[in-house]
Amino acid sequence: MDFMHLLCIFFISVLSCSYLIRGQQPYIRKATTACGSADKSNSALGYTCNGVTPRCQAYLTFRSQPPFTSVSSISSLLAADPSELSQLNSVPEDATFETNKVVLVPVNCSCSGKYYQVNASYVVQKDETFFIIANNTFQGLSTCQALQAQNNNLTTKKLYAGTRLIIPLRCACPTKNQTNDGVDYLLSYLVTWGQYVALIGDIFGADTGRTLDANGLSEDDTVIYPFTTLLVPLEKPPSSSQILPIPSPPPPPPSSPVSSSHTKSKTWIYVVAGVLGSLGLLSVIGVVVFCFFFRKTKSGSKKDIDPVFTSESFEALEKSTEKKFEQEFDFLESVSISAQSLKIYTFKELEFATEGFDLSSLIKGSVYRGRINGDLAAIKEINGDVTKEINILNKINHFNIIRLSGVGFNDGTWYLVYEFAVNGPLCDWIYNNNTSQKFLTWTQRIQIAFDVATGLNYLHRYASPPYVHKDIKSSNILLDTNLRAKIANLSLARSADEDGEHFVLTRHIVGTQGYMAPEYLENGMISPKLDVYSFGVLLMEMLTGKEVSSLYEANSDLSNALRPTLQEENEKANLSSFMDPALEGNYPTDHAIFVIRLIDNCIKKDPSVRPEMDVIVQNLSRTINSSLSWEHTGNFE
Ligand SMILES: *[C@@H]1O[C@H](CO)[C@@H](O)[C@H](O)[C@H]1NC(C)=O
Ligand SMILES: *[C@@H]1O[C@H](CO)[C@@H](O)[C@H](O)[C@H]1NC(C)=O
Ligand SMILES: *[C@@H]1O[C@H](CO)[C@@H](O)[C@H](O)[C@H]1NC(C)=O
Ligand SMILES: *[C@@H]1O[C@H](CO)[C@@H](O)[C@H](O)[C@H]1NC(C)=O
Ligand SMILES: *[C@@H]1O[C@H](CO)[C@@H](O)[C@H](O)[C@H]1NC(C)=O
């Protein structure tokens, strides 16, 4: 394996290869600290003018910091109207805010060329750099890249005290999709330590899904960083009652049975701090891991203690959970027995493995390639409740399911360390675009299908309790050196019959468009047949070399795409127009038709007539055997 090849390696799950979900404005991620580069994929220069109107009322947040603590000083810093600002915050116009108080700032946002912005004017102080002005003075409401771009008429690179700069503040106006959704305003919220998307959405009563979407994030990819802006979509202007003194820890959810939390709360999936509050054995691992790091970090007094642990939110959290830690410390032993294969990594180890989470180690999204004791590993950054995935993967040991080898926790972010699948996600291999050099033969495709079916069959039948994966798609299937498949991303998985029922109903519909079974979309019904449906769609993609979205473009009902090939007359001619042209006819016709029949059964509307996974495994096992002998006796029939 040459080096370039290694570079191209992709792992995982978090990034779907489907282009069905598109964010309104890309989230800036870590670009705020990379002053030299203006990565086009994020919004470092500002939010694009993609809204319905070129100007609109928008809102910013700002934390009062000396010398900007009064209505007038904050208004003049941020180009706001002092009387509007005082009204919005329900304070008199001559008021002074206590330090660190979140202040709502109404602004007139408008397009200046490509980007939305509010022009503030600022005089450089001694020793200030573009970064310090953007990050410290303006707290992340602007970026050094945008400052440089905006003030490129400066004759020198160095900033001198007294120079007047234009500071483009990050704001945005709602897009057509958002307006259709009832969103009238966007608030540029300044993220601080320990916050996550669902929490911020909750502060302003904004739906988490919409908030993720507004920032080009997804349920699989919710990591956000302090001192960046997160757009919060609002139906009404924000009000001062929403920003009661924060940061404060979210209230621990009431102790409810684990099963009901799935349907009740939309936010559980993202909650980090909630992990600490929620009860149930699942959380215990989280608590213990957290506890472990917490103590470790506190005692390691060398250098700066991580800011997250000094921030008020965590201090409060510490108090509220200290009792619980004590009670649950006793669990440590029992958990470490059940989690004995799971290594707990310190942040330092993970930093070392990924060369400080360097861009060159980034695989995609929030997944990094790391080297731990000489072995490659995939390290996924998650801002959310990971205890479920940890709990499931820790109990599962199967060749066709990606192995979780360890976990870490730092700054409100979890790190899951997985076995590394060298050949990356299946989606990089099966879509027939000319740029990709990657090609799978017929037999390799059937082998992969068999592997996925075997992994799913294990989850459905032999895992205890049985699980439904719920998000089978080409980007969640990873290939190892030998192009054998491993199922990844069990973050949406749930137990099929944890209520002792054959199936369960949910109102919380999550998954990937195109792969989701009709009964789930319509009624939220969860059963193993959900995975059978997605598997059928996946198999169809593998045979045709087309993405699910383009399959749907051609046929609103996928079964129709199969019809012509299943008609007796002229079977072969129709088959060749169905199959991936890259295969150039190199497949055994009758097996191909057999597999197409299987797909047809998998994507039946009525879940009860779809085959069980074990039947599929048997069928595919026969197909592999005969495909192998077909391959050995010559490719051409
Ligand atoms: C708006 O929604 C349509 C369909 O729902 C989608 O195709 C389009 O990409 C969306 N636009 C943006 C900017 O998200
Ligand atoms: C924003 O626009 C409104 C209406 O155009 C105007 O009355 C107000 O003074 C503007 N605010 C600022 C701070 O320029
Ligand atoms: C903000 O400043 C830029 C650059 O100086 C200018 O092009 C733009 O028109 C200004 N926008 C407003 C609303 O004043
Ligand atoms: C960015 O600014 C914040 C205060 O807004 C400060 O706490 C943080 O340390 C700054 N980041 C860097 C890298 O200096
Ligand atoms: C750069 O341009 C802005 C307006 O676009 C102006 O206010 C500023 O004085 C200019 N700076 C220099 C050094 O010319």
Image: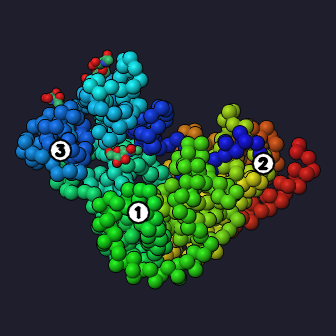
Would you say residue 18 is visible in this rendering? Answer: yes
**View quadrant of ligand 4:** top left
Q: CA distance from mark 3 to mark 1?
A: 31 Å
* Amino acid type of the residue that numbered disc 2 sits on in the rendered structure: Trp
* Pointer 3 with pointer 1, Cβ within 8 A: no
Q: Report which residue position mark 2 lands on.
A: 442
Tell me which amino acid carries mark 1: Val
The part of the image, by quadrant, that contains residue 262 is bottom left
- Residue shown at the point (36%, 71%) measured from the top left: 277
User: Which of the image's four quarters has the N terminus?
Assistant: top right
Q: CA distance from mark 2 to mark 3?
A: 67 Å
For this rendering, which residue is in front, 267 or 420?
420
x then y, percent, for residue 37? 49, 32
Q: Is mark 1 within 8 Å of ligand 4?
A: no
- The residue singled out by tag 1 in the image is 272
Nearer to us in this view, 630 or 366: 366
**Which residue position is annotated with label 3?**
69
Q: Report whether 153 appears left or right of 185.
A: right
**Side of 54 relative to 341 (left or right):** left
Neighbor class of circle 2 (other Cα within 10 Å; few <14, some 14-19, many 20+) is many
Residue 483 lies, with reference to residue 178, above or below; the image says below
Q: Are marks 2 and 1 in contact (CB under 8 Å)?
A: no
Question: What percent of the width, then of the height, locates residue 531?
Answer: 58, 61
User: Which of the two discs, 2 and 3, labels the residue nearer the N terminus?
Assistant: 3
- Asked if one can make out residue 53 in the rendered structure from this viewpoint, the answer is no
